[in-house]
Amino acid sequence: MAIFKKYYSRQGLWTLFLICALPLHLWALFLSLRDFDWITARTNSWDAVGVVSYGLLFAFLESLAIFALAALLGFLISNKWIENKRVALMGTFVIVLSFWSILNQTYFLRAVTPSGQILSLFAGTGRPLIALYITALFLIGLTVILPTYFILRSEKAEKIVLDGFERFSLLMTLYLFFDFIALVIVLVRNF
């Protein structure tokens, strides 16, 4: 446990957890509320509230898993850097990768079809799947490397990121309250 305290404080872990939970809860609420009218029309409002509650609980469990992974991956970051830098890096990684995951899900939910020009560009390479993977890896890598570079090189960028995390932590605390209410609703519905 002493090695854990060397890398993280209680406040640092709490901030990292809140940042890991934020994009998942925003997306879960968006998807749940998107289907609320449809479920209400199909059955009743109580079933729709139940679906939202299950979605929030699942987002909470996902948040715990992603937080554990992010905290463990934080051990790979040099211990020469202070905890704030580690929390800023891991929180930024989670937010960027969550953004890409949300973008991917939106692509399929909206049934977006790429334009013919883009499809012919990838088909013209002779290996369209490899070209697609290389393009995706380049874009994701760029969105991970640039924030990392700025956080590591600039105290001002690190401070901006950490201040943003602190501002969002209040919102995420509200979402944790919603998780508690969702747990009560699920328990009432099942017992």
Image (cartoon, rainbow, N blue to C red):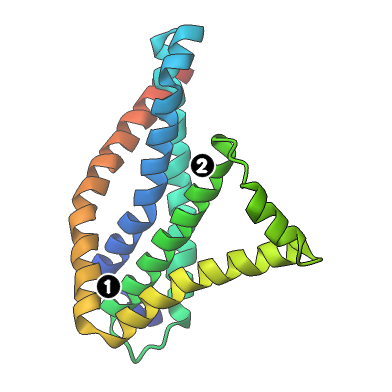
Q: Position of residue 46 (x, y in %)?
A: 40, 12
Q: Is residue 37 depicted above or below 30 in this figure?
A: above
Q: Quadrant of residue 37?
A: top left
Give the amino acid type for the residue marked by disc 1 in the picture: Ser
Query: Left or right: where does residue 163 sit relative to residue 92?
Result: left
Residue at image mark 2: 106
Quadrant location of the N terminus in the rendered image? bottom left
What label sits on residue 9 in the rendered view?
1
Q: Residue furthest bottom?
A: 80
| Residue 103 picture location, percent across and down | 49, 49
Q: Where is residue 38? Give x, y as percent.
A: 47, 15
**Which one is closest to the eye, mark 1 or mark 2?**
2
- Mark 2 secondary-structure assignment: helix
Horizontal arrangement in the rendering, residue 63 relative to residue 16 (left or right) = right
Few, some or many C-alpha atoms within 10 Å of disc 2 (few <14, some 14-19, many ≥20)? few
User: Is there any visible trace of residue 132 in the rendered image?
Assistant: yes
Q: Residue at x 19, y 60 (%)?
A: 166
Helix, strand or loop at label 1? It is loop
Calculate the distance from the C-alpha at mark 1 to the C-alpha at mark 2. Answer: 36 Å
Which residue ends up furthest to the right in the rendered image?
Answer: 126
In this view, the residue in front, 14 or 33, is 33
Picture coordinates of residue 151, whole percent (x, y): 31, 79
- Do labels 1 and 2 touch, CB within 8 Å? no
Residue 67's label in the rendered image is none
Residue 43 visible to an observer of this rendering: no
Pick the front one: 133 or 149: 133
Quarter of the figure with residue 13: bottom left
Which residue occupies 66% across, 48% down?
116
Q: Quadrant of residue 96?
A: bottom left
Please state which amino acid type lies under the numbered disc 2. Thr
Seen from this angle, which residue lies furthest front? 117
